[in-house]
């Protein structure tokens, strides 16, 4: 099992910035991917960004150029720096961790609310 603890959500005005953090603990495989998803009211959960242990990143088109994902492997922690926030970014943001072995196992954080006011 892997436990994920998120922090850093909140309320910000449009154009502002927030930084999310997610610390993983427990049975973490040497090969893993971490990332962030989000879910707005009435919508499906969607990918925001992912990062491998080697540092390869993937972003949703809607956040490219505004959000930056990074990780500290020594701390098993992933970060999401969100700049130029828009009201459309309002959602619950979920940390995601995938252990990769012969198959894979996904784990989710409890979610943190990000609200962007116009």
Image (cartoon, grey):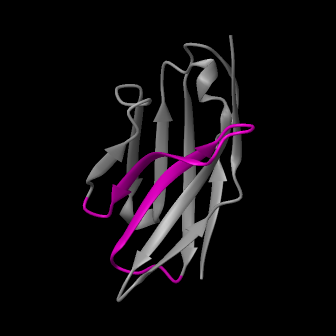
**Measured along the vertical axis of the image, is residue 103 above or below residue 111?**
below
- Residue visible at 57% across and 17% down in the picture: 16
> Which residues lie in the magenta part?
27-54
List x then y, in percent, for residue 4: 61, 65
Tell me where residue 66 sits by quadrant.
Answer: top left
| Image position of 39 (left or right of 33) | right
- Residue visible at 35% across and 54% down in the picture: 51
Q: Is residue 29 magenta?
A: yes
**Measured along the vertical axis of the image, is residue 17 above or below residue 105?**
above
**Measured along the vertical axis of the image, is residue 113 above or below residue 18?**
below
Q: Quadrant of the C terminus?
A: top right
Could you say which is closer to the camera, residue 76 or residue 102?
102
Q: Quadrant of the N terminus?
A: bottom right
List x then y, in percent, for residue 112: 70, 46
Tell me where residue 109 sits by quadrant.
Answer: bottom right
Tell me where residue 108 sits by quadrant.
Answer: bottom right
**Measured along the vertical axis of the image, is residue 87 above or below residue 111?**
above
| Image position of 81 (left or right of 14) | left
Could you say which is closer to the camera, residue 114 or residue 74?
114
- Residue visible at 51% across and 50% down in the picture: 36
| Image position of 50 (left or right of 92) | left
Farthest-out residue, bottom:
102
Farthest-out residue, top:
118
The count of marks equals: 0
List x then y, in percent, for residue 85: 55, 21
List x then y, in percent, for residue 37: 55, 49
């Amino acid at each position: 099992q892997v436990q994920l603890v998120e922090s850093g959500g909140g309320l910000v005005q449009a154009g502002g910035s927030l930084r999310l953090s997610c610390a993983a603990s427990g049975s973490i495989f040497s090969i893993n991917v971490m990332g962030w998803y989000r879910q707005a009211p009435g919508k499906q959960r969607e990918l925001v960004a992912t990062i491998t242990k080697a540092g390869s990143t993937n972003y949703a088109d809607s956040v490219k150029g505004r959000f930056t994902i990074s990780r500290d492997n020594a701390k098993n922690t992933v970060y999401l720096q969100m700049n130029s926030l828009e009201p459309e970014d309002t959602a619950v943001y979920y940390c995601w961790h995938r252990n990769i072995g012969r198959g894979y196992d996904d784990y989710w954080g409890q979610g943190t609310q990000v609200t962007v006011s116009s």
